[in-house]
Image: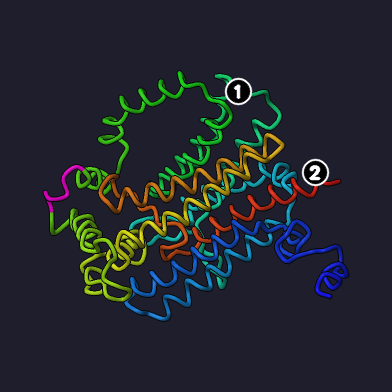
């Protein structure tokens, strides 16, 4: 009888299968499930990091809701639409970045926001995390690969213009992520190792000049602190010293949820934003950190799988860049919090308290899902 019932179900459709509801909504089940679990875990960590403040949790939940709404909407749009509009969105983003320099809202010594009266404030720099890789992928979509030297020069210009505008705000963390997003497309497009080695050599030579003539004083202090945080243990080195103390005190299994001392006794600054990983390590220990890394690995791996299955050049390059940029987010934050990299203000993705960055990240995953599900649908007709 049960077999007869199954045979009578319309087309044998399931909830998550190829003909199921999730698929028909252009959503990717494994990626969506991993993102939901990650965000729920992030809310638990944030509740503890924010000293059990329910308002913080509510605001983060609203932003996550907005992010998943953006994910759903962007997943419905065919990839060919992103390719068509990539130059226009990139140009609009540049205009907004220029406007920030003249009429942007200033906070904490940085001018990064545009305010829409009666609505909200947002960071145009976040838009460029999607617009720059889409623009570079669009550039390569009609050209033969691997990239030639002329292509490399033009892509460098496409990438560096918004990067320099963002660095002027100043926002070193976001400018580095935008640069990474664009250059990753160039790397996936087949950049030769000779050019990569030459670029790294030039960067190594230019680093001292950048330190003295490009970086702001507070950014130079961050570099100094990275090499010797104990030189100013009660000042510039306080954050990283307390972060490493919290990570080390968690041991294997941690002190338990809501039982962290470094964050809840206010020893650890920025515990709900850039240094939230230290809270997780203290309360969840090595096991908690490894579980988080497993979630990140699933998400990044799924993104790379989607890029591998993409059939068109634009889709493959854009999907690869989105997945690898997410990896850079995770890598830089973990390195920053553990003292392996300088502090550059990069949040832990979908865990740290934030606004525009959360929406941008989830919007990127919506584009990934669009690339995957529309490819499947088109290949079946």
Task: Residue under label 2, please give it.
Answer: 379
Residue 8 relative to residue 332: left or right: right
Q: Is residue 211 left or right of residue 129?
A: left
Instruction: Name the secondary structure under disc 1.
Output: loop
Does any portion of residue 230 appear in the rendered image?
A: yes
Image point (68%, 58%), residue name: 27
Write the residue at 21% across / 63% down. 249
Q: Which mark is residue 146?
A: 1
Q: From the viewer's perspective, tell me whether residue 157 is left or right of residue 227.
A: right
Q: Nearer the viewer, mark 2 or mark 1?
A: 2
**Residue 114 visible in the shown view:** no
Residue 156's x, y, as percent? 51, 30
| Mark 2: few/some/many CA within 10 Å (<14, 14-19, 20+) | few
Which range of residues does the magenta coloring cover?
A: 227-232
Instruction: Assign the magenta stretch its main secondary structure.
Output: helix
Q: Secondary structure under badge 2?
A: helix
How many numbered discs sit on the rendered protein? 2
Label 2 to label 1, Cα distance in Å?
26 Å
Name the image quarter holding the N terminus: bottom right
Which image quadrant for residue 45?
bottom left
261 lies above or below 170 = below
- Residue 285 x/y as whole percent: 29, 63
The foreground one among 375 and 154 is 375
Q: Earlier in the sequence, mark 2 or mark 1?
A: 1
Q: Residues within 10 Å of mark 1 (few under 14, many from 20)?
A: some
Q: Residue at x 41, y 72 (%)?
A: 44
Magenta-colored stretch includes residue 13: no
Measured as percent of width and height from the top left, residue 316 is found at 64, 38
Is 17 displayed left or right of 224 in the figure?
right
Q: Which mark is residue 114?
A: none
């Amino acid at each position: 009888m049960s077999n007869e019932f199954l045979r009578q179900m319309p087309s044998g459709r399931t909830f998550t299968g190829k003909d199921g509801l999730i698929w028909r909504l252009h959503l990717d089940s494994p990626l969506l499930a991993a993102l939901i679990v990650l965000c729920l875990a992030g809310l638990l960590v944030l509740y503890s990091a924010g000293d059990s403040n329910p308002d913080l949790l509510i605001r983060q939940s609203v932003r996550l809701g907005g992010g998943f709404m953006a994910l759903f909407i962007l997943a419905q749009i065919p990839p060919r639409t992103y390719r068509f509009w990539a130059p226009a969105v990139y140009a609009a983003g540049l205009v907004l970045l220029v406007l920030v320099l003249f009429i942007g809202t200033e906070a904490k010594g940085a001018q990064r926001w545009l305010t829409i009266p009666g609505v909200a404030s947002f960071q145009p720099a976040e838009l460029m995390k999607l617009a720059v890789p889409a623009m570079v992928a669009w550039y390569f979509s009609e050209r033969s690969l691997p990239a030639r030297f002329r292509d490399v020069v033009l892509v460098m210009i496409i990438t560096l213009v918004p990067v320099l505008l963002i660095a002027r705000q100043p926002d070193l963390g976001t400018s580095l992520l935008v640069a990474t997003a664009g250059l990753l497309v160039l790397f996936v497009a087949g950049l030769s190792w000779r050019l990569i080695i030459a670029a790294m050599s030039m960067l190594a030579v230019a680093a001292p000049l950048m330190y003295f003539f490009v970086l702001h004083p507070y950014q130079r202090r961050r570099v100094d602190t990275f090499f010797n945080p104990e030189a100013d243990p009660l000042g510039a080195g306080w954050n990283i010293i307390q972060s490493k103390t919290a990570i080390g005190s968690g041991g294997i299994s941690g002190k338990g949820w809501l039982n962290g001392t470094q964050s809840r006794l206010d020893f650890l600054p920025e515990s709900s934003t850039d240094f939230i990983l230290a809270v997780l390590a203290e309360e969840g220990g090595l096991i908690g950190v490894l579980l988080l890394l497993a979630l990140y690995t699933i998400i990044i791996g799924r993104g790379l799988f989607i890029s591998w299955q993409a059939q068109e050049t634009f889709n493959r390059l854009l999907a690869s860049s989105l997945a690898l940029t997410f990896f850079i987010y995770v890598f830089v934050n973990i390195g920053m919090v553990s003292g392996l990299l300088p502090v550059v203000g990069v949040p832990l993705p979908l865990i740290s308290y934030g606004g525009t960055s959360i929406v941008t990240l989830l919007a990127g995953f919506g584009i990934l899902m669009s690339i995957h599900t529309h490819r499947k649908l088109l290949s079946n007709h």
